[in-house]
Image: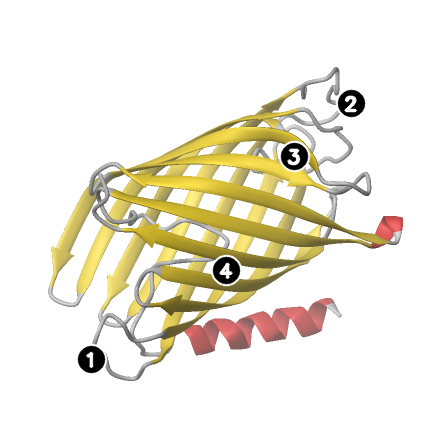
Amino acid sequence: MKHYLIVTSAILLALVTTTSRAQELFVYSEPASNMPAKSLGIRLSNTILDESHLNKTTDQFIPELMWGVNKNLMIHAEGFFNNSTATFEYLGAAAYAKYRFYSHDDVHKHFRLAAFARVAYNNGHVHYEELQTNGMNTGYTFGLVGTQLLHKQAIAASLSYEQITDNGGDNRIHDGRAYQGINYTVSTGRLIFPKKYASYRQTNLNVMLELLGQQLPQNGLYYLDIAPSLQIILNSQTRIDLGYRKELWGNMERMTTSSVLIRVEHLLFNVL
């Protein structure tokens, strides 16, 4: 099965990196570019987690409010909910910010760098070795992301440091578990419809492929996931994402090694 996934990922990478008009709105990670200045947005993300070790599926719901402060700074406020106990429960919240500090623009190409950070609080149980301040753990994350656009191809990569602490409600990290991790992502994508732009009101269909990994230096545990996805953009304002995430390699205990993401996002331009 692993050999099949490796071959499939190689084929998908080859397809996605062929010549085409690039998109910079990735599904599982953020690019170095920001949302439009003076805009507000709402994002609703639902991840269906396949907890096969418990013979059940769990929904993790994350609503977000987004603010494009200016062309270089954007801020998100996030809430965390899931139904791991059979009913949806509020588990915590987070604040996320991204600041673009470098941009080199040219005809049909640009390179951008941004710094990002997330601070999160969570009162859920701490069961797993995976670190995830975006949904499961109290803690913080900070890192860098770069996006390169060359003619019609966009590629992004990020590197971040993540540290967790005990969750609220006396939900402590188990003895011997790591609380520091290094995260990394590589993302690429292309527009497959329309073939030619005639209006910003045209519907866009994008295909993405992302690799997402985590390494825990304290105990040598790691994982590497592959995440193909489809994205529809309506009227340059409403975005619909559908993604599938699957572990390629790993040796840590996780809530799931397989999940489906469904997301809807809507922007309001020039409202501030």
The label on residue 174 is 2
Evaluate if marks 4 and 3 touch, with contact meaning CB atoms under 8 Å apart.
Answer: no
Q: Label 3 amino acid? A: Met
Q: Quadrant of residue 97?
A: top left
**N-terminal label among 3 and 2:** 3
The quarter holding residue 130 reads top right
Mark 2 crowd level (few <14, some 14–19, many ≥20, 10 Å Cα) = few
Give the mark, 1 or 3, whose residue is nearer the N terminus: 3
Report the coloring of the rendering.
secondary structure
Q: Which residue is mark 3?
A: 136
Query: Of residues 68 and 130, which is closer to you in this image?
Result: 68
Q: Which residue is tagged 4?
A: 210
Find disc 1 in the rendering and name its residue: 198
Q: CA distance from mark 4 to mark 3?
A: 21 Å
Q: Is label 4 in a helix, a strand or a loop?
A: strand
Say what amino acid the circle numbered 2 marks.
His
Image quadrant where residue 131 sits: top right
Determine the secondary structure under disc 1: loop
Mark 4 or mark 2, which is nearer the start of the sequence? 2
Query: Closer to the observer: label 1 or label 4?
Result: 1
Alpha carbons under labels 1 and 2: distance apart: 57 Å
Is 208 situated left or right of 200 in this image? right
Q: CA distance from mark 2 to mark 4?
A: 31 Å
Q: Residues within 10 Å of mark 1 (few under 14, many from 20)?
A: few
C-alpha distance separating marks 1 and 4: 29 Å
Q: Residue at x 63, y 52 (%)?
A: 47
Name the residue at 49% across, 45% down.
184
Name the residue at the bottom extreme.
Answer: 195
The quadrant of the image that shows the N terminus is: bottom right
